[in-house]
Amino acid sequence: EAQVTQNPRYLITVTGKKLTVTCSQNMNHEYMSWYRQDPGLGLRQIYYSMNVEVTDKGDVPEGYKVSRKEKRNFPLILESPSPNQTSLYFCASSSWGEGSHEQYFGPGTRLTVT
Amino acid sequence: AQSVSQHNHHVILSEAASLELGCNYSYGGTVNLFWYVQYPGQHLQLLLKYFSGDPLVKGIKGFEAEFIKSKFSFNLRKPSVQWSDTAEYFCAVNAPSLNDYKLSFGAGTTVTVRA
């Protein structure tokens, strides 16, 4: 089954404790992206990756890091989480070729930073 | 980056009523347009998309949307809603002509359907 998976689905942590949210897709997509969803703001892009070893900042990259060492994986790293990073996070992937570049979303990770 | 505006923050209606959600975007070039739905506690699912051809697009669950280029709009419609259509709806745009595949989302519209 074609899918995007994220782990963990729920995470409660404390300020300053480094964490990683994993994202994996099995569709051989070149493009992967991280979004955060906050009430009244919709989804905002954090980082994206056009392919292996190619990443770039989205609209709200501050406080986040990513890496793309393999095509299928795109982890999101919070080196020193703060309460304003409490949010719902979605990973997405898309093919790079012709077409509409529909993005497929993972199930989401709800992060609470206390 | 493109900006996307969704006109309604929260819509409440009764079953069998018609639904129309407005969406406008800022970029005047070639765009791909999407409507996603997020049911309570679930991830985003694609309702429908437009990237070329017939500007009236039909999606899943009886939804349709019309792309009006002159108005920079991509409004979502459903003639008769059901209780199960209660969800949050997001309009999204990208601009492949700019080599910009980032998906820009509107703020979302919460739809509540009362039985």
Image (tube, coloured by chain):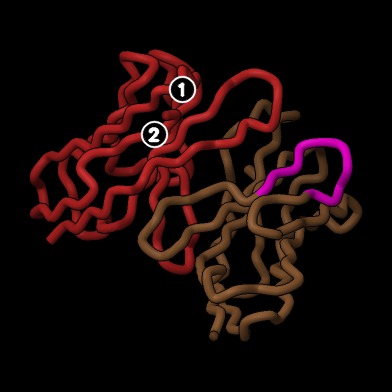
Chain colours: A red, B brown
Residue plotted at (67% across, 71% down): B7
- The magenta span reads B48-57
Q: Earlier in the sequence, mark 2 or mark 1?
A: 2
B2 over A24 or under it: above or below: below
Residue B82 appears in the figure: yes
Q: Which mark is residue B9?
A: none
B113 over A43 or under it: above or below: below
Spot occupied by residue B70 in the image (x, y as percentages of width and height):
91, 54
**Separation of marks 2 and 1 at Cα, in angstroms:** 8 Å
Residue linked to disc 1: A27
Amino acid beneath label 2 = Val
Spot occupied by residue A26 in the image (x, y as percentages of width and height):
40, 23
Residue linked to disc 2: A4
Pointer 2 chain: A
Number of marks: 2
Left or right of B6? Residue A18 is left
Where, quadrant-wise, is the N terminus of chain A in this rendering? top left
Spot occupied by residue A72 in the image (x, y as percentages of width and height):
37, 20
Left or right of B108? Residue B55 is right
Q: Are marks 2 and 1 in contact (CB under 8 Å)?
A: yes
Amino acid beneath label 1 = Met
Residue plotted at (45% across, 25% down): A49
Q: Are marks 2 and 1 on the same chain?
A: yes
A76 over B14 or under it: above or below: above
Pointer 1 chain: A
Left or right of B107? Residue A20 is left
Taking depth in this image into account, of B74 and B86 the one nearest to the observer is: B86
Q: Secondary structure at mark 1?
A: loop
Q: Secondary structure at mark 2?
A: strand
